Image (spheres, helix red, strand yellow):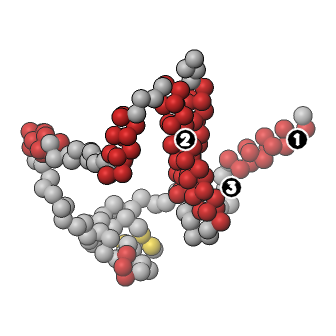
Amino acid sequence: MGWMLVLRRHAVMKMTPDPSQPNPQPSPQPNQGEAGHRYRFRNGKPVDPAEGLHPEMADVEQVPEPSCPIPTSPDALIAMQSKNSNERPEKPVRQQSAKVKQVVDLIESLDTSAHEDQQIALMIVRHLERMHDDIVDEMRDDSDAKHSQIVAWAVDADRLMRCRNLLESVDLD
């Protein structure tokens, strides 16, 4: 209980200003100086905001011209938005390679049971899963590999493992 009293006294002492110190509040100064945008003062005189800045930072106030026109009315904004919305590209459709087309044609021409189809699908998923696991192992040992790439490949390997587990759990009997 005694330490709480000490803390309260310390907090109260910090909050009350010391009468021997000058008033910490700044004296009112005008908001604008010679250039119309001065806001800092030293000894009652405006301070150049670029004072002490690196030369590359001195031109920060210059705003580059916008690359596209700025609409001046709501109608112009709506027209600009509707014009740009039609320009979205469609997602490209991947074409089947000759090898994929040959394998698909072979699978369709075979007279297989559902259990055999499941085994074929499992073999393909296992092959993909093994490839992803091997790439993750290689990237782990590579000091130049990015962490985000390793994570992406590992997440895909995990998805393939889940897919394999789901395929294996399907009961076709």
User: Dot 3: within a 10 Å radius of its alpha carbon, few (fewer than 14), some, or many (20 or more) residues?
Assistant: few
Q: Mark 1 points at which residue?
A: 3
Is label 1 in a helix, a strand or a loop? Answer: helix
Foreground pick, 78 / 147? 147
- Residue 47: give x, y in percent of width and height: 39, 74
Which three-letter amino acid code belongs to the residue tagged 3? Asp
The kind of secondary structure element at disc 2 is helix
Position in image of residue 95 (x %, y %): 28, 48
Quarter occupied by the N terminus: top right
Q: Which residue is drawn at 55% across and 63% down?
A: 146
The amino acid on which the numbered mark 2 sits, given as a three-letter code, is: Met
Residue carrying label 3: 18
- Which-is-in-front pick, marks 3 and 2? 2
Q: In which quarter of the image is the C terminus?
A: top right
Say what amino acid the circle numbered 1 marks. Answer: Trp
Tell me the quarter of the picture where residue 41 sits: bottom left
Figure check: 150 above or below 158: below
